[in-house]
Image (tube, rainbow, N blue to C red):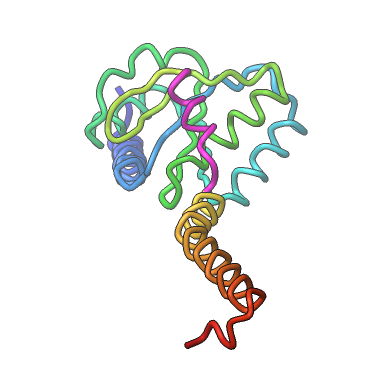
Amino acid sequence: MPSEKILRAKQEIVAGLADEFKQAQSIVFADYRGLTVEQDTVMRTALRQTGVKYRVVKNSISSRALADAGYEGLDDILKGPTAIAYSVDDVVASAKVLKEYADKFNKLKIKGGIMEGKAIDVNEVNRLAAIPGKEVLQGQLVYTLVSPITCLAIVLQGIKEKMEGAGSESADA
């Protein structure tokens, strides 16, 4: 039986993780066995640069923290060494970066994740990773909004030029 001090320390870790998991937009789980220190360092740097937190915690602690955060159905995912990546700001960031490095480093295996409070499988994590980033989506939205207006302006300019070329004094009238 662990001492009272150790038990309290573990409870604080679980509570802290549970709070972080509750705030996360999405969570991705991966098996990191076989990565070299250099590969792990490169991946952690990329995760940090995109605002993704990456943790390796004992499965028993992770399981309790996830349960306290309200997530169920993760027993199969939390078998064996498991790293947890999550972002508070971006839904796709953790999936995108882990997928990128899973493709680069054959040893890194995505195990599943959590999206909108529900467990998702590897295929759903891969689909999540395929979604364009926030900036790309914003650019596509702006293009979609501006495109019809631009086309209208081009058509109106063409009509004006045609009318002026046909001998009308002014197409402005």
Q: Quadrant of residue 33?
A: top right
Residue 41 image point, x, y percent: 71, 38
Is residue 2 left or right of 170 when viewed as pictured?
left
Nearer the observer, 128 or 55: 128
Residue 20 image point, x, y percent: 36, 46
Residue drawn 59% across the image and 88% down it:
169
Whether residue 5 is situated above or below residue 61 in the rendered picture: below
Is residue 81 left or right of 91 when viewed as pictured?
right
Residue 129 image point, x, y percent: 53, 32
Whether residue 171 is situated above or below residue 52 in the rendered picture: below
Nearer the observer, 93 or 52: 93
Residue drawn 62% across the image and 79% down it:
164
Tell whether position 130 is magenta. yes
Is residue 79 left or right of 72 when viewed as pictured?
right
Residue drawn 58% across the image and 82% down it:
168
Q: Quadrant of residue 70?
A: top left
Nearer the observer, 113 or 144: 144
Q: Which residues are magenta?
A: 123-133
